[in-house]
Amino acid sequence: MKKISYQVLLLDDKPETLHYLLDMLHDLPFIAEPLVLSDLEEAFLYLKDNEVDILFLDMDFGRTDLDGVRFLGMINRPPLTIACSSTSGYVFDAHEVGIYKYIGKTISFKALERILKDAAEEADRKEERERRDIVKLELTDVSGREIMLQVADIYYAQVSNNVVTVYTAQEEFEFKISLREFDAQLPVDRFSRSHFSFLVALDRVKKIEGKKVHLTGVHSESLLPISQEYNKSFRHALEQYRQRWS
């Protein structure tokens, strides 16, 4: 597994049925504090702006217009998904949309641990496949200009008021996009978030002092924050990057 901990979201219209599963997730050291949501619209917006490695998805939300399978089809580049349902009526449909596993809510701890270890490794492979060999991004800035952004030129990106500002050696670019969406287009092993609002190019990091990231080159005077939420994952990503490229 490439990460210290994996972000997990559980989406179920009856969250009170997840207590047993949540207790087991808390006992797995490679799983971060799981988030539980019960509203599909809220979950859709959350997935747009936040990183989720593994999604536990209920299949039946008691709605005729929307179930788990249809919800998954609405998401652009969904996370690795495990169907978690008390009914087996959606097994075929779940397989058709690429859901990784189909489990019941009373699965044993040993079985859950085995599935999640495999799922974490598959999530790593999925992320690497999606972002391999990306050299440039074609984006439209806030003024409507088409921008060809070279990945190697990026120092860091910052989000404010739903606008991401990307800093290179020569210029700054502003895009109407979430930081999560921007991050999802970049090579997985070369960028990491130090803070909810900051994404850092690991090859531009000179050093870390306390809760500040010092950059190299023209942005050497910029001190970027490291929040408690991202501290471990950022330091781990930087260590892995340096081990790989040193």
Image: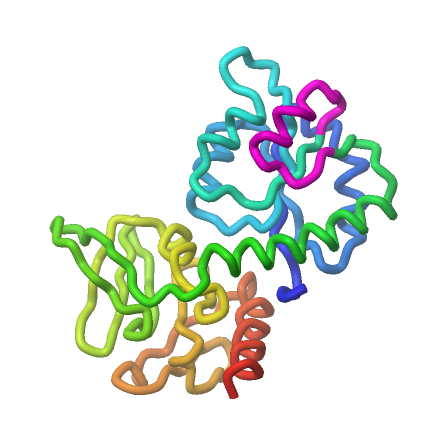
Task: Answer whether residue 104 is magenta in the image.
Answer: no
Q: How is the image coloured?
A: rainbow
Residue 191: percent from left, percent from top: 44, 68
At x 63%, y 20%, the residue is 60
Towards the viewer: 86 or 40: 86
Task: Answer whether residue 100 is magenta in the image.
Answer: yes
Residue 94: percent from left, percent from top: 63, 29
Q: Is residue 104 left or right of residue 230?
A: right
Q: On the rendered image, what quadrant is the N terminus found in?
A: bottom right
Q: Quadrant of residue 108?
A: top right
At x 32%, y 69%, the residue is 151
- The image shows residue 169, relative to residue 34, as above or below, that is below
Q: Is residue 185 left or right of residue 221?
A: right
Q: Quadrant of residue 215?
A: bottom left
Query: What count of labels does the image hold?
Result: 0
- The image shows residue 59, relative to residue 199, as above or below, that is above
- The image shows residue 193, relative to residue 65, as above or below, that is below
Residue 180: percent from left, percent from top: 41, 52
Most extreme residue toward the top is 64
Q: Is residue 178 left or right of residue 5?
A: left
- Magenta segment: 85-102
Towards the viewer: 185 or 97: 97
Residue 177: percent from left, percent from top: 30, 49
